[in-house]
Amino acid sequence: MHPAIQERVNGLNAMRARCKLATVEMYAMIGKEPPAQKIRYQVVAKGVSAYHVVEIETGKVRGFRFNWKDAINFAQALEARADGVKVTLSQAVQQ
């Protein structure tokens, strides 16, 4: 990736983290629970026994599976990783 683009991506990630932290602090100050985290990944059927795992925010396909259960497990693993939980997938799910 070009250094200028990487700098921009890093800057946006830092601003996103600050925004989340500010939101949590604001809700703590008023004594209310912050809103629940929205779902980030969605499984979309793309034919007979073909499923895409799509990132809702960007619309990008993050992976695909040929079994619905594997697609759901992959989407849940991506959600967990986005929340900062360390997840390892079995070899069957990674393929």
Image (spheres, rainbow, N blue to C red):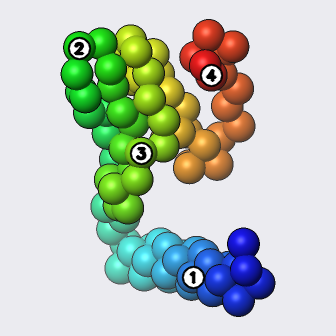
* Distance (Cα) linking label 3 and label 1: 21 Å
Which numbered dot is residue 94?
4
Circles 3 and 2 in contact, beta carbons < 8 Å? no
Q: Position of residue 88 (x, y in %)?
A: 70, 26
The residue mark sitting in front, 4 or 2, is 2
> How busy is the neighbourhood of tag 2: few (under 14 within 10 Å), some, or many (20 plus)?
few
Q: Of the residues tagged 3 and 1, which is closer to the observer? A: 3
Residue neighbourhood size for the residue with mark 1, other residues' Cα within 10 Å, grouped as few (<14), some (14–19), many (≥20): few
As drawn, 64 above or below 34: above
Q: Give above or below for 59 relative to 62.
A: below
> Label 1 belongs to which residue?
12
Mark 1 touching mark 4, by CB under 8 A? no
Image mark for residue 61: 3
Label 4 and label 2: CA atoms lie apart by 20 Å
| Label ID, residue 48 | 2
Cα separation, mark 2 vs mark 1, equals 38 Å
